Amino acid sequence: MQRVFQHRVARFFYIIIYLVLNTSVAPKYDVNAKIKALYMYNFAKYIEWPSSYKTGDFVIGVVGETPVYQNLQAMAKVKKVFNQSIKIVKYSSASEVQKCHMLLLPTAMTSKVSECSSKIKASSTLLVTEKPGVGTRSGINFVVVNQKQKFELNKGNISSHNLTVSGNLLKLAIVI
């Protein structure tokens, strides 16, 4: 009898844990957030920026909430892009976006891709997205292929922002 009771209690806790982890109340953790932040750091090194973007801080903007933001913040404390300190700027909405080198548009903000594109149209800003199917509208788009973090690269969109992609970066990308 006691075994049956223990089994029911254990099952109850498993159900509670499952419900908590799979509801909108529980924070969604992106297991690839650190990988995405490291990718972004390397994108910075393998893209040729105009001379006006090679002075001052190297600015990475993030629109909305994403676990990648915290990883970028941690990276910015210890890394540089060539001789530039890295500054991470968080924007609540696309309308707040200002001049930056890279702009990350998380999955939850994908509906704002057109607004962000318009906002950075005249600048040399690399738009980075993270939702399958958005790569044709951004410069780089994070995707998962065979359970591995990869990225799509839209060379035409990147070139239209007066940016040049290194051949080494092209070799690693899924070119679209």
Image (cartoon, rainbow, N blue to C red):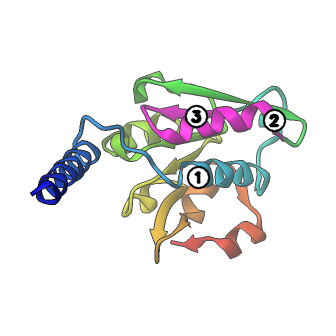
Tag 3, which secondary structure? helix
Q: Which mark is residue 118?
A: none
Q: Earlier in the sequence, mark 1 or mark 3?
A: 1
For marks 1 and 3, give the one nearer the viewer: 3
Residue bearing mark 2: 78
Observer-nearest of 6 and 12: 6
109 to the left or right of 22: right
Tell me the CA gap for discs 1 and 2.
Answer: 17 Å
Residue bearing mark 1: 36
107 to the left or right of 13: right
Q: Is residue 123 visible?
A: no
In the image, what residue occupies the spot 70% across and 76% down? 171
- How far from the left and from the top, in percent, is residue 96? 46, 22
- How far from the left and from the top, in percent, is residue 175? 56, 73
Observer-nearest of 171 and 115: 171
Q: Which mark is residue 70?
A: 3
Magenta stretch encompasses residue 3: no
The quarter of the rendered structure image containing the N terminus is bottom left
The quadrant where residue 173 appears? bottom right
Q: Dot 3, how many residues are within 10 Å of its Cα: few (below 14), some (14-19), or many (20+)? A: some
In the image, what residue occupies the spot 47% across and 74% down? 145
- How far from the left and from the top, in percent, is residue 45? 79, 52
Magenta stretch encompasses residue 65: yes
Residue stretch in magenta = 60-80
Q: Is residue 37 above or below residue 54?
A: below
